[in-house]
Each structure stands twice: as C-alpha cells, then as structure tokens.
Amino acid sequence: MSTQTIQTQPFTGQKPGTSGLRKKVGVFQQRHYLENFVQAIFDALGDVKGKTLALGGDGRYHNRVAVQTILKMAAANGVAKVMVGKDGILSTPGTSCVIRKHKLSGGIILSASHNPGGPDGDFGIKYNIDNGGPAPEKVTDAIFAKTETITRYLISDALDYDIDTIASGTLDGMTVEVIDPVADYAELMQQLFDFNAIKTWLANGHRIRYDALSAVGGPYAIEILEGLLGAPKGSVVNGIPLEDFGGHHPDPNPVYATDLIEHLDAADAPDIGAASDGDADRNMIVGRKLVVTPSDSLAIIAAHATVAPGYKSGLAGIARSMPTSQAADVVAKALGIPAYETPTGWKFFGNLLDAGKATVCGEESYGTGSNHIREKDGVWAVLFWLNILAATGKGVAEIVEEHWAKYGRHFYSRHDFEGIDTDAANTLMSDLRGKLTTLVGTQLANRTVQLADDFAYLDPVDGSLSQKQGVRIIFADGSRIIYRLSGTGTEGATLRVYLESYEADVTRHATPPQEALADLITASRELARIAELTGRKEPTVVT
Ligand code: G1P
Ligand code: ZN
C-alpha cells in the first residue's frame, strides 16, 4: 500500500454554500471531482496529521463510493484516525454528537439534506468543525480558495475498507473505527429526556407514527423509539435508508410527507406523527388533523422546556432565523429571557450556543435544535414532543391550541417559487431593494409599513456582520413579508416568500392560514412583480 499523488486541475464552482457543496450526482461522478474537494478540505485545514475525524452520510446514492474515497484520501493525507458510521451511515446530528463526545477535530458528512437522491438526484459533502457544527465562512472560504488552485491530490492505493462490520482496524497506517451510528446519539438522548415517562405513555397505549422517508432518520428512530422506548414494531415506517430514498422526496413537510398527513387525518390516527429529512436534521410534527408549523413547534418546545430533564433549569435564551415566525419571541418575553434573530442557516446559531446565550433554536424550514449538539436535530425534536405529551397528558392539538390561546397565534406560510431564471430572480431582489426606503409609511395589504430593509446581522459574540440576508417588510401590526433567494437549490434560483400575521383573538385562531394571510400574499406578489419578472403566477411549493 502506498500514497499516490494524482495530478488534477480545478473545477469551477466548487464553492460550498451554507450547507456544504451540493450538486447533481452526475457532477460528483466526474473524475477527480469529489477528490479535488476533499483534498481542498484537507489542504485548508492545514496539518491534519495526528487528527481524528468523523465520517458518514445519509446513505444516498454515491455515499458508499464517496466514503471509500475519503478514507483512502484521509490515510494518504496523514489523518491519524477516522470514526466512520457502519455502512457509511451517520445522520448530521449523529455526526455532530460523535464529534463532540469524542472531542474530534471535525467530521465530513455526505448529504444533500432534503434534496432527492438516486442516480439522478443530488449529492453533497460538508465539513463540520470541532464544536460539532458546520464550518464557519472563513473555513468554507479557505476550502473554496484551495479548490481554485488545486494541482494534485493524495490517495492511498489500498483496497476498499470493510465498513459493514463494527470493528477497529487500519487502512494504510490510519486507524479506522467503524462505529454504531446510533449508540452515542441514543445515549445523549437518554440524558436529555424522561425516557421512563415516555415509556409509560407508550405502554398506556399512546401511539406514534414516525415516517423516516427511507432516509437516515430510520435507524435512529427504530433504535430509540421501538428499541429503547418500547413503541410497537411498525411505529417507524420507511425506516431503512435507501439510496434513492425509495423515491421519496425526503423533506418533512405537508407537501412531501403526504402519506403521514393522511394517517394523521384518519379515524384511527395515532397520537402524534413525525417525519425527518434525508440526513435527519429536519423534523415535522403532526397532530390529529393538525400540522404543527416549525415556528410554533420551536415556541411550544421553549414554553414547555422544563418538563425535559436536560432543560429543567430553564433556557438561557431562544434563537430563531429571521424568516421564522415571531412566536418564539413572545415566549422568550414571557419567560424573561433574550430572543435572538439570526440570518437563515444553522451556522449562525453556533456562536450563540457556544457562548451560552441561547439554549434552543429553530428555523421555519422544519429545523429545531438546542445546545446539546451544533446541528438541528430531527429525532431530538420528536423526543421533545413525546416528553411534552407524556408529561402533560395532553394531545398535540390541545397543546397547540392552548399555546395560541395563551400567547396569540402567528399565522405563517412560506411560498417557494422554485427553478426560476437566475437573472430574473436577481433582478427581482435588486428591484425590491431599490424601493425599500420609499415603502416606509405607505399602505400595503391594508396595513402600514413600519420598516422595510435588507436584514443585516451583527453577531453578538464575534462581532461579524452579515449583510443582505433577506428583504423584510414589517408592518405596524407586527405582520411581515420577507423575500430571499435560496442558497441550497441546485437548479436555477428559488425565491422564498415568507408571510406572517399575528392574531390575539382566540375566536379567529381556527382560520386556515392561507385565508388569514390572503391580503399579505396578494401584496407580496404585486410588490415584487413576481408574475411579471419570473413568469410564475403561483408558487411551486406552499408550506
Ligand atoms: C434552506 C432553509 C434554511 C436551512 C437550509 C439548510 O436554505 O431555508 O432555513 O438552514 O435550507 O437546511 P435556503 O434554501 O432557504 O437557503
Ligand atoms: Zn437536512
């Protein structure tokens, strides 16, 4: 066995976004493509000699091939040890947990999150640092810079390593430990939640349906829910990770998890439905005939946090991404703790969590989490809900309705215009930015515009400034229209329009959200001239 030095040259556009480098599988299958990016990671890290890394992915197509390549490259680059999930499987939160628990230098996660998989789907790779969270911009910038000047990569000519057996061994001088992808994570969950209470709740006949959408949440949910908590077999459906996710679009929202919604609408519906995405960092919570919005879920978790042993001494603060509804802010105010508003993307929560300023955080895009790791965490959110149900003896709908009655309801919806022309999308955003100052004080959607700006975030921990994070139109009554372009799509541009209005009057809480938001929706389309500039009258996805 020996190290091979392979001559190569840069590919254009290997720029990692907020969630790493994400491209069509075919792009990753090009000769040297993955290798160049992995070498750029090692080169950007500087000296990787003597370091230990975690490695695994969501099991999508190309996962196994990529794991073998990365193992051989890690060995050739002098990495001391890699902890790799059995079968190449590790969820994003699972990896974060492993990095933190074993004090690793970082980890490489293979995932394109909630994007479809299979030979025609997407693939992705991201690097997480030693706190278990996504690499900050200075690291991803350094990786990108290396991809632009790369001339060679190092790889061992060793044979493929057996990643299907839990054991330790060596690959060309590097230690490889194949680990149970669930064990460390399951142990952490038992520290955070009242497993006995949940066990009793389940033993009393309460039921959960967890749809893993044939993605990586499955092994975690099966082991924890059916194994440790004693939920009947079959409580987790689509629990085996498949390379094409069984054709599922592994995005836990009412549009893609339709089967789950149907089960929760049925006469014999379980008490709670849940789903997670490709890499199990996103979650959706569903009650009987009721989908809990992620913004409400964050607020409700925060309001009930002390029922869970890991949070019994209360929360230091609550953080949410800017487009996420203000429901969490209302809870923070009631609890007398700070509320933080960050740009979209989990990485912005890292500093707040590290500094102990926030304990729980969340995004409207079905992401919820806390300081237990440095990623959002799908299974964690489901366990939190189970703990709340078990501790209160109430149902999901009851919890949600009581929450609205106490704090008011934030009607919320996101309208996505996917795959639009990139130039049109950029024009739309710059046109909007151009008219912001003239909007203040005018009437729109029968409301007065109080503030119109392009969100900028000054990180209270490191003082860094992130600008142009989304156009906000904020009304005097607290309603908001927000526009931003997606940073994670792989085809054309995606315009996201976020709509929110507040309703204190309990007699109006049952209004369907699209109806409650109707005038804001109309105004959002007219103001941005969406149909005119993009040719789209209606959004592709409404959540
Ligand atoms: C989307 C979500 C964002 C999330 C990210 C990664 O990003 O909107 O909240 O952090 O995926 O899961 P976007 O495509 O909007 O840039
Ligand atoms: Zn994800």
Image: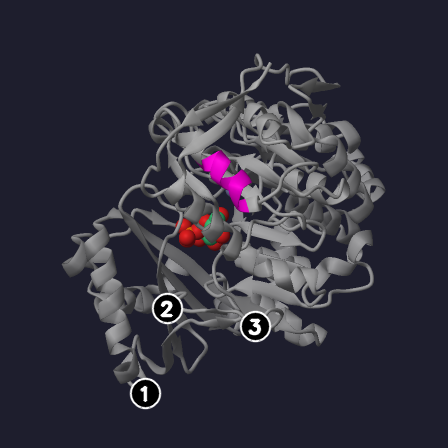
Q: Mark 3 sits on what residue?
A: 463
Gap in angstroms between the C-alphas marked 3 and 1: 31 Å
Q: Check the image and report above or below for 109 versus 467.
A: above
Q: Are marks 3 and 2 in contact (CB under 8 Å)?
A: no
Please give the range of residues in magenta: 37-44
Disc with the residue nearer the chain's start (3 vs 2): 3
Q: What percent of the width, then of the height, locates residue 474?
A: 40, 76
The dominant secondary structure in magenta is helix
Q: Is mark 1 within 8 Å of ligand 1?
A: no
Q: Secondary structure at mark 3?
A: loop
Q: Is residue 427 left or right of residue 142?
A: left
Residue at image position (35%, 26%) is 30
Q: Secondary structure at mark 2?
A: strand
Count neighbours of disc 3 (C-alpha within 10 A) and say few if under 14, some if 14 to 19, many if 20 or more. few
Residue 246 highlighted magenta (yes or no)? no
Q: Mark 1 sits on what residue?
A: 441
Disc with the residue nearer the chain's start (3 vs 1): 1
Residue at image position (62%, 42%) is 47
Q: Is residue 393 left or right of residue 349?
A: right
Residue 223 appears in view:
yes
What label does residue 481 carry, if any?
2
Q: Amino acid at mark 3?
A: Gly
Q: Amino acid at mark 1?
A: Gly
Q: Check the image and report above or below for 117 versus 413.
A: above
Gap in angstroms between the C-alphas marked 2 and 1: 15 Å
Q: Amino acid at mark 2?
A: Ile
Residue 39 highlighted magenta (yes or no)? yes
